[in-house]
Image: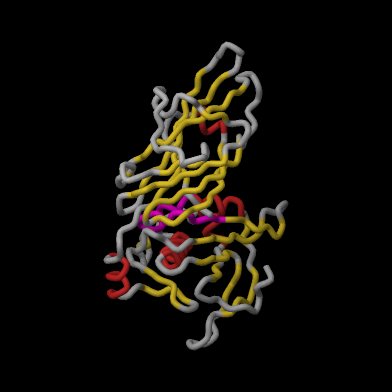
Amino acid sequence: MNLIGSSEDLYLECKTVAEEEINENRITNKQSVVFFNYGKALSAFANAEGGIVIWGLFAKEQDKSSPDLISEARPIKKVTKVKTDFDSIIGKVVSRRVVGVQNKVVYTDKQEDTGFIVTKIPKSDEAPHRVEGERQGSRRYYRRHGDGSYEMEHYELEELFGGRSMPYLTFVSSAKTEHSLRNGLSECRIKFGLKNVGKSVAKYPFFEMELPPQLIPYSYGVDGNRNIGMPHAIGSQSKYQGNVNHVIHIDNILWIDAIRYLFDPTSEIKDPLCQLKIRVACDGFRMRNSELTINLTDLLKTTDILEFDLTE
């Protein structure tokens, strides 16, 4: 990475991962240094303006008045496994999960499985987030200031806790499969909707979906009686616009409509099934443009509700 000689700032932090923590499988342990550092990074950036952490770069302290300088690359060994561990602890390292965190590997040598991990942390609508774990420094709230992450002051916590409660929407789906149709095909019927995981009622929801060619509208709606959860926007079959009668209460789901996919049950499943482009908004929740990866395998193996974060 061409960042050697640069300095950390409000939106960038660099961390290393010790080999012994990888070799001894300690990353997911609540007492490990990496578990704490990952949680502190999520807490600090999510409680501020968001930012990026690059794992595998060493930043050296200069003096108290100057930001730490990125001085050395220390690529992570077994980087694929470390990335998997990072993905698995996103919801464990802080209280109140930070929605939209992404980890991406940048290989220096893919055959040797070495490289860097870039963690993108968005500004959170659900702040404040507290670090969890069992190391000293856990059970505290952090925030990014300048080039460092610091424990939050009392007034900062009052500011976030006392702020206006906001709704937060996620995309949900639930599938049902019927086999042996008259033409020998099977049908996977997918109903979709929005879930409110925020702190306030979601009013005037809006939903738009660009339907890929392999998915077909289901004419019998969400309940089999041709009913849909929100009316179509005037002049559009891909947009749904709620009115004063359409609210999504906290932790509730509004099922909107249904689509279907026809497939040959004797053929090998090839995933991903499609990339689903959607737009979602409501009063107090700004418009999100998201592209979701839909796998047929996931739809067929469960009738449970699948939930997707709306990352941009």
Residue 162 sits above or below residue 109 on the image: below
Residue 2 coordinates in the image, percent (x, y): 69, 71
Residue 214 sits above or below residue 60 on the image: above
261 horizontally vs 250: left or right: right
**Where does the magenta region start and end?**
88-103
Q: Is residue 194 visible?
A: yes
Residue 97 location, quadrant: bottom left
Residue 198 coordinates in the image, percent (x, y): 34, 52
Foreground residue among 190 and 218: 218
Residue in the picture at 52% in, 86% down: 66
105 horizontally vs 239: left or right: right
Residue in the picture at 57% in, 41% down: 210
Residue 15 coordinates in the image, percent (x, y): 54, 68
Q: Quadrant of the N terminus?
A: bottom right
Foreground residue among 143 and 262: 262
Residue 147 coordinates in the image, percent (x, y): 49, 77
